[in-house]
Image (cartoon, helix red, strand yellow):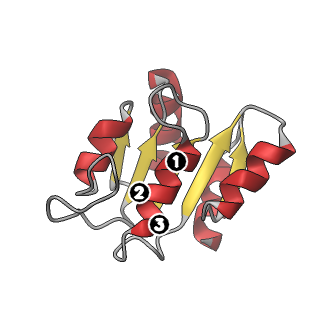
Amino acid sequence: MNIVVIDDHQNTIKLIKQMLDMKGYKNVTTFVEVEEALQYLGLGQKGKQHSTPNEVDIILTDILMPKMTGIELCRLIKQHPIFRHVPVLMMTAYDNEQLLQEALQAGAFDYIRKPFTVGCTITAGNEA
């Protein structure tokens, strides 16, 4: 399974990668910058394909990031036919139902509340 993790906090990325590694997920690609993630996915800032995308089975992204929110990122990803069916899991420390509903309406498969455990991350990913 090829997993992409996007979060603007390096410590969160390290924690998620360690948790996924402990569960046997070795193909985990991480990004602190949304632009780098878009480039990896073969997409530009406006969601248009500009290169051959890498194969991705699931995307975990923080909801609130400085340059582009996870919700905006999800909308861009879901516009692209190759990624339309790739599950996007949102991660958030905020207890804001309106924000979570907006994420689901943007095409997110589900969300995970921070702080999270290994089990909830993997369970949500396996359900996708």
Residue 41 pos. (x, y %): 28, 56
Q: Nearer the viewer, mark 2 or mark 1?
A: 1
Rendered residue at 44%/29% (across/down): 67
Please state which amino acid type lies under the numbered disc 3: Lys
Check disc 1 and report its element: helix, strand or loop: helix
Give yes or no for contact between labels 3 and 2 (Cβ–Cβ under 8 Å): no
- In the image shown, does 12 or 103 lie closer to the viewer? 103
Identify the image quadrant of the C terminus.
Answer: bottom right
Q: Position of residue 80 (x, y in %)?
A: 37, 69
> Which numbered disc, 3 or 2, marks the residue closer to the eye?
3
Q: Nearer the viewer, residue 33 or 3?
A: 33
Judging by the rendered image, the residue that carries numbered circle 3 is 78
Report the residue marked by disc 2.
3
Q: Amino acid at mark 1?
A: Glu
Neighbours of disc 2 within 10 Å: few (<14), some (14-19), many (20+): some
Element type at mark 3: helix
Report the residue that reaches farthest toward the left. Answer: 51
Disc 2 to disc 1, C-alpha distance:
19 Å
Report the residue at 16% width, 58% height from top.
50
What's under tag 2, amino acid-wise? Ile
Tell me which residue sits at (37%, 77%) in the image. 81
The answer to whether 100 is drawn above or below residue 49 in the figure is above
Q: Position of residue 110 (x, y in %)?
A: 69, 60
In this rendering, would 102 be left or right of 95?
left
Q: Helix or strand or loop: what does disc 2 sit on?
A: strand
Is 101 located above or below residue 116 in the figure?
A: below
Q: Which residue is mark 1?
A: 72
Residue 24 in view in this figure = no
Quadrant location of residue 6?
top left
Neighbor class of circle 1 (other Cα within 10 Å; few <14, some 14-19, many 20+) is some
Q: Earlier in the sequence, mark 3 or mark 2?
A: 2
